[in-house]
Image (cartoon, rainbow, N blue to C red):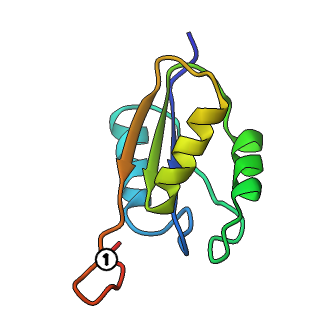
Amino acid sequence: MTKPTVYMFHGFTSFADDHWFPWLEDQVEHQLKIPFKKLNFPDSYHPDVAAWDRYCDQTIQAADNITLVGHSLGCIQVLHYLQAHAIKNINVLLVPALMNPFGQSQN
């Protein structure tokens, strides 16, 4: 069985070390002793589906027993990745971005 790994998918205008991602990395690696890999998609201000798909294919080992965590647009990218790969025994956590009443993101 493949060693479990958690992959973090950031969203639109976001990067690997933004928001609550470092906190989650610390919790997963130090409390659960599971490798945590924060993805850093190319040009998150102008996301390109094909470029993000290629990045995932180059970065993620498509193996059973992994966890994919998506935030904001990263949720959609998690679904793209799952559609393209036949992975079994996978965990998925999707965290949407929140909007305040004025339409500004509350990440």
- Measuring from the top left, give residue 61's x and y in whole percent: 68, 30
Q: Which residue occupies the foreground of this view, 11 or 27?
A: 11
Residue extending furthest bottom?
A: 102
Q: Quadrant of residue 23?
A: bottom left
Q: Secondary structure at mark 1?
A: loop
Q: Residue 37 or 26: which is nearer the viewer? A: 37
Residue 43 in the image, given as x and y percentages of width and height: 70, 71
- Judge whether 104 appears above or below 13 on screen: below
Name of the residue lying farthest toward the top: 1
Task: Tell me: residue 12, above or below residue 102.
Answer: above
Type of amino acid at the residue the image marks with label 1: Gln
Q: Tell me the residue that label 1 is attached to.
A: 106
Q: Residue at x 53, y 71 (%)?
A: 14
Q: Residues within 10 Å of mark 1 (few under 14, many from 20)?
A: few
Question: Would residue 11 be found to the left or right of residue 83 on screen?
Answer: left
Towards the viewer: 69 or 1: 69
Residue plotted at (69% across, 45% down): 56
The image quadrant of residue 59 is: top right
Q: Relative to 83, is 17 on the left or the right?
A: left
Spot occupied by residue 58 in the image (x, y as percentages of width and height) = 77, 42
**Residue in view at x 74 percent, y 50 percent:** 55
- Residue 59 can be seen, yes or no: yes
**Residue 37 makes an appearance in the image:** no
Quadrant of the image for the C terminus? bottom left
How many marks do you count on the picture?
Answer: 1
81 with respect to 30 (left or right)? right
Q: Position of residue 11 (x, y in %)?
A: 51, 64
The quadrant of the rendering that contains the N terminus is top right
Most distant residue in the left direction: 101
